[in-house]
Image (spheres, grey):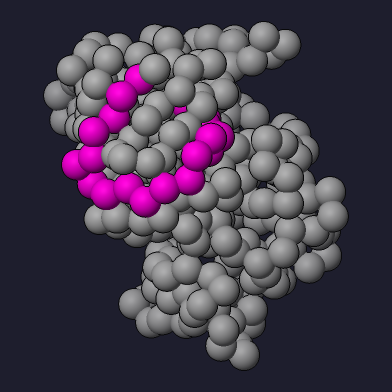
């Protein structure tokens, strides 16, 4: 199967909104500058993540651009900006997030984050006190802020399937935390991919790529490791995008698979990948599935 690289994204600060790129270097640690920084709670030592919406959904009101170790620009909800190298950055972020955090480029030893159980968030709402699991970072890429692997990809085939199978008129059924939406809410940014790959196929083709290699452009080669299990993050408001609970309910109904053999089936969208050979890629590059 062949396709094209339709979109290229990086998220300079973990759990904040990111930026779309036209081209980037991709190395063993992912798209240059991706998840190079993260806020860490000063009291618990845990990495702040919107996977625990009750405490950290405010991260998705912030947008970051740039690449550490250089300055990363963070746009605040009121339109003001702060730089990652400003002396007051920790104070500003702590005030916006309502908790004491330190912005760092070095993962704590044994770095973990809180992952609220997504079904519980759907049932009880984003402000409810729901069961939370500790999730280690950097399982496939030690020493990084990645949840599992340094590259996350999703195909247009998957996004089309989600939209087509869940489309409903505007003003339809609503959940406790807002509208279900109309199917046009499956913007790629809800799933926070690095790569959006346009393929002439239907359905969740990433499932079939696990264990295979992708060649992107002239140099970059990836190995697909696993389907990506989804947390509550895709359902949350992302900047101006409203809350969209079908972003999780749809894959729960349509694509509940085991991301790894030792795990139970979970709602999955997209896939995780490792970098086999580094290279520069640009939007529009040819993608070949080996």
For residue 85, side relative to residue 197 (left or right): right
At horizontal 25% and vertical 55% (from top left) the residue drawn is: 22
Residue at (15% x, 24% y) in the render: 169
Q: Is residue 139 left or right of residue 249?
A: right
Whole-percent x, y for residue 20 in the image: 30, 55
Residue 144, given in percent of the width and then of the height, sits at 67, 51
Residue 183: x %, y % from top left: 23, 26
User: Is residue 54 in view?
Assistant: no
Q: Is residue 79 above or below residue 194?
A: below
- Please determine whether, in this image, residue 205 is positioned above or below residue 116: above
User: Which quarter of the image is occupied by the N terminus?
Assistant: top left
Depicted 85 relative to depicted 217: above or below? below
Does 277 appear in magenta? Answer: yes
Q: Is residue 4 magenta?
A: no
Q: Residue at x 75, y 34 (%)?
A: 133
Image-quadrant location for residue 24 = bottom left
Magenta stretch, main secondary structure class: strand
Query: Which of the pair 207/59 is nearer the observer?
Result: 207
Q: Quadrant of residue 87?
A: bottom right
Q: Residue at x 47, y 74 (%)?
A: 72
Residue furthest left in the image: 169
Most distant residue in the bottom direction: 87
Which region of the structure is painted magenta? 271-289
Left or right: 141 with respect to 283?
right
Judge whether residue 272 can be spotted in this image: yes
Residue 134 percent location from the top left of the image: 77, 38
């Amino acid at each position: 199967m062949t396709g094209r690289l339709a979109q290229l994204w990086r998220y300079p600060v973990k759990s904040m909104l990111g930026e779309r790129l036209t081209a980037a270097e991709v190395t063993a640690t992912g798209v240059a500058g991706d998840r190079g920084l993260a806020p860490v709670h000063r009291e618990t030592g845990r990495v702040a993540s919107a996977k625990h919406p009750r405490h950290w959904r405010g991260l998705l009101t912030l947008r970051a651009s740039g690449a550490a170790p250089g300055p990363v620009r963070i746009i605040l909800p009121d339109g003001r900006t702060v730089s990652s190298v400003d002396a007051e950055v920790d104070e500003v972020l702590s005030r916006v997030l309502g908790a004491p955090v330190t912005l760092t480029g070095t993962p704590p030893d044994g770095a973990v984050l809180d992952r609220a159980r997504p079904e519980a968030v759907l049932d009880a709402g984003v402000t409810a006190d729901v069961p939370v699991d500790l999730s280690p970072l950097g399982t496939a890429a030690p020493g990084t802020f990645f949840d599992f692997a340094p590259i996350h990809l999703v195909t247009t085939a998957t996004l089309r399937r989600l939209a087509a199978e869940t489309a409903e008129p505007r003003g339809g059924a609503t959940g406790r935390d807002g509208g279900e939406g109309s199917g046009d809410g499956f913007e790629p940014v809800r799933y926070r991919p690095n790569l959006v790959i346009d393929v002439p196929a239907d359905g969740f083709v990433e499932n079939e790529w696990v264990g295979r290699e992708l060649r992107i452009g002239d140099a970059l080669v990836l190995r697909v490791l696993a389907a990506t299990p989804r947390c509550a993050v895709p359902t949350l408001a992302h900047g101006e995008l409203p809350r969209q609970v079908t972003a999780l309910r749809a894959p729960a109904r349509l694509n509940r698979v085991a991301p790894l053999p030792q795990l139970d089936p979970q709602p999955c969208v997209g896939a995780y990948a490792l970098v086999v050979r580094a290279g520069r890629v640009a939007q529009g590059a040819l993608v070949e599935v080996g």
